[in-house]
Amino acid sequence: MAWNVLIVDDQKLARMLFENIVNTSGRYVLAASVPSARQAVQICMEQSIDLVLMDIVMGDGYHGLEASEEIKRVSPRTRIIIMTSMPESGYLKRAQEIGVESFWYKEVQEQPLLEIMDRTMAGEHVYPSVSPRVA
């Protein structure tokens, strides 16, 4: 079975990298790739999305955690992986409160994103062991 994936990141280069991971995985299908959390919510209301790869801080001012909370409200079966390069520990706590399945730091990468995707779709909740330290 192939899982439908929505990528949400305002950075074009990051989206392209994540698109490549999805497209070469052999088990995920790219449903859409968008630069806006608002677009993500709309897509999840209109399409069957199995997994959302969601950045937190985006240029349109609509926070990825806010969008994740709304997606969980309209499509509770959709699984979400929060992806961020921001070492803000409050994000981890908020993601857990919302019910986001997994959390992945772009810069630290304790585990490869594809592994986190697989574990998330297998029903695991994957969170980093520690927040990255800022030098």
Image (cartoon, rainbow, N blue to C red):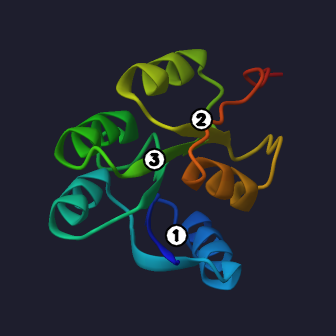
Secondary structure of the residue carrying tag 1 is: helix
> Is label 2 or label 1 in front?
2
How packed mark 1 is, by other alpha carbons closer than 10 Å (few <14, some 14-19, many 20 or more), is few
Identify residue type, mark 3: Ile
Give amino acid for label 2. Answer: His
Which residue shows up at 72% across the image and 22% down it?
131
The residue positioned 46% from the left and 40% from the top of the image is 56
Name the residue: 81% across, 47% down. Answer: 111
Q: Is residue 4 above or below residue 119?
A: below
Tell me the crowding category of disc 3: few under 14, some 14 to 19, or many 20 or more residues within 10 angstroms, Cα based. many
Which disc, if any, is residue 108? none
The residue to which callout 2 is attached is 125
> Label 1: which residue?
12
Viewer-nearest residue: 79 or 65: 79
List the residue tagged with mark 3.
Answer: 80
Estimate the spatial distance between the alpha carbons at disc 2 and disc 3, rounded to whole Å: 10 Å
87 displayed left or right of 109: left
Distance from the alpha carbon under mark 2 to that under mark 1:
27 Å
CB atoms at circles 2 and 3 under 8 Å apart? no
- Give x and y (percent) for residue 109: 79, 45
- Residue 58, percent from left and from top: 40, 47
Q: Say how many tags the image has.
A: 3
Mark 2 or 3, closer to the camera: 2
Amino acid type of the residue tagged 1 in the rendering: Lys
Relative image position of residue 106 (x, y in whole percent):
69, 47
| Disc with the residue nearer the chain's start (2 vs 3) | 3
Is 77 above or below relative to 42?
above
Q: Are marks 3 and 1 in contact (CB under 8 Å)?
A: no
